[in-house]
Amino acid sequence: HKKRKLHILINNAGVIRCPKMYTQEGIELQFGVNHIGHLLLTNLLLDTLKDSAPSRIVNVSSSAHKRGKIKFDDLNNEKTYEPGEAYAQSKLANILFTKELANKLKGTGVTVNAVHPGIVRTEITRYMGIYQNFLGRLAVDTLY
């Protein structure tokens, strides 16, 4: 039985600034989709990535991580919920996970990086007010 190879994993699933919602597991949606899903998938594939080295893990994050704070006393945003803060927290978690995993995998042939994708008008922007008005759409369409 031939082992399967995996040389690149790009964790790119995401939601942004959505109303307060939860995953089926009860995790705040942005944290669950943007971070926990990436963490789980990466851990499930880690042995295959190591066996396939050289390989790479790319976590799509956001410059919004700079505004993020990990609310250890309210990780699930149950006390207060502000969509932008919840998004920034999920993206900071991506960065911290990336740094820790990169350190853990030094010398294994697996590199780990985080990237900011820039602004692209896709369905991910459906809860962001700027993209709902004409000038916002024009700016994004003009720039990208």
Image: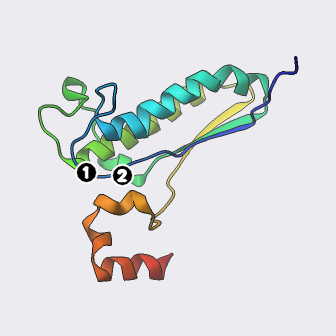
Q: Residue 44 occupies which quadrant of the picture?
A: top right
Residue that mark 1 sits on: 84
Q: Secondary structure at mark 2?
A: helix
The image shows residue 102 at horizontal and vertical percentages of 59, 30
Foreground tag (1 vs 2): 1
Q: Which of the pair 38/101 is nearer the observer?
A: 38
User: Residue at image x 11%, y 32%?
Assistant: 79
The residue that appears at 41% across and 38% down in the rendered structure is 33
Type of amino acid at the residue the image marks with label 2: Ala
Residue closest to the eye, 9 or 98: 9
Q: Which mark is residue 22?
A: none
Q: CA distance from mark 1 to mark 2?
A: 9 Å
Q: Residues within 10 Å of mark 2 (few under 14, many from 20)?
A: some
Q: Earlier in the sequence, mark 1 or mark 2?
A: 2
Q: Residue 80 appears in which quarter of the rendering?
A: top left
Q: Please provide percent x and percent y for residue 21.
A: 25, 40
Q: Which residue bears the numbered disc 2?
A: 64
x then y, percent, for residue 73: 19, 24
Q: Nearer the viewer, residue 92 or 7?
A: 7
Residue type at mark 1 is Gly
**In the orientation shown, which residue stands out farthest toward the right?**
1
**Quarter of the image containing the N terminus?**
top right
Tell whether 1 sits left or right of 98. Answer: right
Compared to residue 82, the image places residue 32 above or below, namely above
Dots 1 and 2: beta carbons under 8 Å? yes
